[in-house]
Image: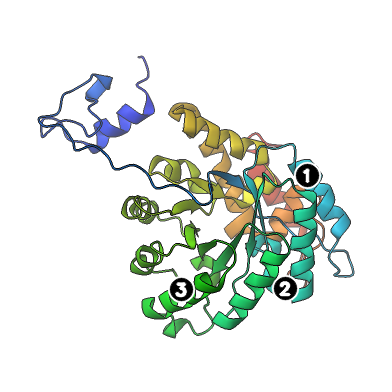
Amino acid sequence: MARVPLAPRLLSLLWPRGACPHPTGIGVGGARRGFAAASPPAAAPPSRRLDLRGIYPPLATPFTAQGKVDYARLEENLRLYAEIPFRGLVVQGSNGEAPYLTQQERLEVVRRVRQAVPKEKLLLAGTGCESTQGTIELTAQIADKGADAALVVTPCYFRGSMTSAALIHHYTQVADASPIPVILYSVPANTNLELPNDAVFRLAQHPNIVGIKDSGGNITRLGLFVYKTQHEDFQVLAGSASFLLASYIVGASGGVCALANVLGMPVCQLEQLCQAGHWDEARELQHRLIEPNIAVTSKFGVPGLKQAMEWFGFKGGFCRAPLLPLSESQVMELHQDFSSNGWL
């Protein structure tokens, strides 16, 4: 039996027969179907202050055995990543162990990465602190080191008080003061706090807030962000390679994916397949990326990511305490997650 392309198959499952035409005008089996009335012309998309479309690895920070930042290994990784068609790089994110770096180290990492990376590659830098004032100050300092945009994670220590009103006030103050565009960052697995939808919709209207990285994995939420902010200068980035295909289907602009530190070329290939509309090939590649991505994120975290980087020719280096390296049994399980999907 001939295979029906993925997009029409999805429509056939999601759209009941006989009720009304399919939303794209494609019927079951791919035949064109007419609409009863013409749709109003779509509004022109807003001009973009910063084009975020593409894939970004959230860089790992290699450390020496003595716990010092290993700048030589970091720069070696940057040379290798230059051969991969990333839109840009993220520094000082969760996978960079940003909470474990001193402020001086954070600024020096940004400076060195900017120095090594061509200007056409965007440099997004994490600047989120627990206080609004601390975030404002760090954002200004990191902007001075060459970052193109600030990735600002939700403050979460006083989680019970982080209402929509508090978060809107926080991000508005930061964006008002920031010399570079601000990207919201919601990562509930680490903060146990999800940036509320109503706060995102409100903040998307701020002229200096240009997007969100959402790592929660709720595709309905991502699709709603795309839909509700379509007339704003605001873009949505998926925060994981596990749901990258689904994110592109609902209109995301790109992804910040830990797995791109290890399998950068395949993650970029997945983006290219989605952009070209090759959905069957994209689905097959997405399936092979899910287990490795889980392994280097929720399963084994940064120690797993750094171990996997070493297998693929990159320099993961040591983690900084209190993070511990993987045990021998964990290393074997991590290897299985990659080899069983054809990557090792």
Q: CA distance from mark 2 to mark 1?
A: 25 Å
- The residue at the point 43 percent across, 84 percent down is 160
Instruction: Name the quadrant of the N terminus.
Output: top left
> Viewer-nearest of labels 2 and 1?
2
Looking at the rendered structure, the secondary structure element under dot 1 is helix
Name the one closer to the observer, 59 or 210. Answer: 210
Residue 317, by quadrant, is: bottom right
- The residue at the point 71 percent across, 59 percent down is 146
- The residue at the point 59 percent across, 66 percent down is 179
Amino acid type at mark 3: Thr
To which residue does mark 2 refer?
100
Q: CA distance from mark 1 to mark 3?
A: 43 Å
Residue 161, by quadrant, is: bottom left
Instruction: Name the quadrant of the C terminus.
Output: top right
> Viewer-nearest of labels 2 and 3?
3
Q: Is residue 139 visible?
A: yes
Looking at the rendered structure, the secondary structure element under dot 2 is helix
Q: CA distance from mark 2 to mark 3?
A: 27 Å
Amino acid type at mark 2: Tyr
Q: Earlier in the sequence, mark 2 or mark 1?
A: 2
- Graded by Cα atoms within 10 Å as few (under 14), some (14 to 19) or many (20 or more), the crowding at tag 2 reads some
Q: Which mark is on residue 172?
A: 3
- Graded by Cα atoms within 10 Å as few (under 14), some (14 to 19) or many (20 or more), the crowding at tag 1 reads few
Q: Earlier in the sequence, mark 1 or mark 3?
A: 3
Q: Earlier in the sequence, mark 2 or mark 3?
A: 2
Q: Is residue 314 visible?
A: no
Asked if residue 87 is positioned above or below residue 168 in the image, the reply reads above
To which residue does mark 1 refer?
311
Looking at the rendered structure, the secondary structure element under dot 3 is helix
